[in-house]
Image (tube, rainbow, N blue to C red):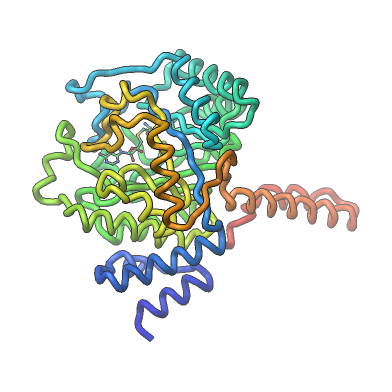
């Protein structure tokens, strides 16, 4: 048995891979080996989440940002981008369009702001979207770091999933990618806040950053597992010339084909290790190759986020260069995507929220534990067991 055979066998049986084993999988480069890795991940995907893709129509509603991340094209110091915020009614309309197109869910994403006007506006928008779609459209937010109070308000308004990428789980690399006022611990604390507020929580990283090693990426996968997240959104890092990281381009830029493969390997390994979570096949994959997102699905992803932002605004929401679909309107994207996905033999969960199975599983375990605790409390006439059980992570032993 080769090392690859034994790791894939272990992955199939338990998903419990070590950092060395994950790093080994990420280092594969022969096409035959990659095909085996992707096939193994696809089998795990079929077993745990099915051959089904869900759509989240993404509305990128503003590029006004208070942060200054060294990699991002909409960082506050980039004076070459013109700033916009889509009028509330148009944001709502784009989300309602997603519901009418039976997307099941929408994602609201923007640059980061936490001023009261912004927090109030997002709350109003969430409520209005829920109202106009009879509560049927699932809503994911991707609006950065916020206070616990803000997360709670947005959850209560009706959003139920939140994506906050850790960007890299390595503290040192994190500090090389962000100015001193961006704090790794604060970002981590936000993931806890989101969980406490009731959200299904997603995180992720950028893949192929300057100074990033395969070891870092392998540790990222174990970070996802430790955090017990419900969803993963990660994608290749793509250089943007008007950002400080552009100076590393010559030394660190990974050739397109290799970067695409690295992104796909990360999806595959994450599927093997985390099994029942939702994993997005992100637009950055499509930026590298036209069929990048379908390849992502074949490597284990199960979520696609078609852009439903008004085309007139897309030009200014350039996190990275050559972002695809700048001039295709949302309905063109829908037809083209449906054909592409059906062509690889998957069905699309039209009109369904497509929630994370992992989240459902955790809720179920929590209920069972509480139920058991109640029973045992009844049996021995004490309620103390309830407290013992309810604070415990139901999935900690995964
Ligand atoms: N401000 C919000 C969301 C907007 S940015 C937040 O902080 O969560 C969404 C994601 O785009 C970021 O989390 C980052 O991972 C990704 N991104 C930014 N610049 C990028 C680049 N140059 N290449 C690839 N992805 C990038």
Depth check, front residue: 101 or 276: 101
The residue sitting at 48% across, 20% down in the picture is 93
What is the tally of numbered marks visible in this picture?
Answer: 0
Q: Position of residue 328 (x, y in %)?
A: 32, 32
The residue sitting at 21% across, 37% down in the picture is 321
Depth check, front residue: 108 or 117: 108
- Quarter holding the N terminus is bottom left
* In this rendering, position of residue 366 left or right of residue 246: right
Q: Position of residue 263 (x, y in %)?
A: 31, 54
Image quarter for ligand 1 equals top left
Q: Is residue 296 above or below residue 150?
A: below
* In this rendering, position of residue 369 left or right of residue 169: right
* In this rendering, position of residue 214 left or right of residue 186: left
Q: Is residue 330 above or below residue 267?
A: above
Depth check, front residue: 141 or 131: 131
Point out the residue furthest to the left here.
Answer: 250
The residue sitting at 50% across, 37% down in the picture is 162
Q: Position of residue 29 (x, y in %)?
A: 25, 68
Q: Position of residue 226 (x, y in %)?
A: 49, 55
Q: Quadrant of residue 104?
A: top right
């Amino acid at each position: 048995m080769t090392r690859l055979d034994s790791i894939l066998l272990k992955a199939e049986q338990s998903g419990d891979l070590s950092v060395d084993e994950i790093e080994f999988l990420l280092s594969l480069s022969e096409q035959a080996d990659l095909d085996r890795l992707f096939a193994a991940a696809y089998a795990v995907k079929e077993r745990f989440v099915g051959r089904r893709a869900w759509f989240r129509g993404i509305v990128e509603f503003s590029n006004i940002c208070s942060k200054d991340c060294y990699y991002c094209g909409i960082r506050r110091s980039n004076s070459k981008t013109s700033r916009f915020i889509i009028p509330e009614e148009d944001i709502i309309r784009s989300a309602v369009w997603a519901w009418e197109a039976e997307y099941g869910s929408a994602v609201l994403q923007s640059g980061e702001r936490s001023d009261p006007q912004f927090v109030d506006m997002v709350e109003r928008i969430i409520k209005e979207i829920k109202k106009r779609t009879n509560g049927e459209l699932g809503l994911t937010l991707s609006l950065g770091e916020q206070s616990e109070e803000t997360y709670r308000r947005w959850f209560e308004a009706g959003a139920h999933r939140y994506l906050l990428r850790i960007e890299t789980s390595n503290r040192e690399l994190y500090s090389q990618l962000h100015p001193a006022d961006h704090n790794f611990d604060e970002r981590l604390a936000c993931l806890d806040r989101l969980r406490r507020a009731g959200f299904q929580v997603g995180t992720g990283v950028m893949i192929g950053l300057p100074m990033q090693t395969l070891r870092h990426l392998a540790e990222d996968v174990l970070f996802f597992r430790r955090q017990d997240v419900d969803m993963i959104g990660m994608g290749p890092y793509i250089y943007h010339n008007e950002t400080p990281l552009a100076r590393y381009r010559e030394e660190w830029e990974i050739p397109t084909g290799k970067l695409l493969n690295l992104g796909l390997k990360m999806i595959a390994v994450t599927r093997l290790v985390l099994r029942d979570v939702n994993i997005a096949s992100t637009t950055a994959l499509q930026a590298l190759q036209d069929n990048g997102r379908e390849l992502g699905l074949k490597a284990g992803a199960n979520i696609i986020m078609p852009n439903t932002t008004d085309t007139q605004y897309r030009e200014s929401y350039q996190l990275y260069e050559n972002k695809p679909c700048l001039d295709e309107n949302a309905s063109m994207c829908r037809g083209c995507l449906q054909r592409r996905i059906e062509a690889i033999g998957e069905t699309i969960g039209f009109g369904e929220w497509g929630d994370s199975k992992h989240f459902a599983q955790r809720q179920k375990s929590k209920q069972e534990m509480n139920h058991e605790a109640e029973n045992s409390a009844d049996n021995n006439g004490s309620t103390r067991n309830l407290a013992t059980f309810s604070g415990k992570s139901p999935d900690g032993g995964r």
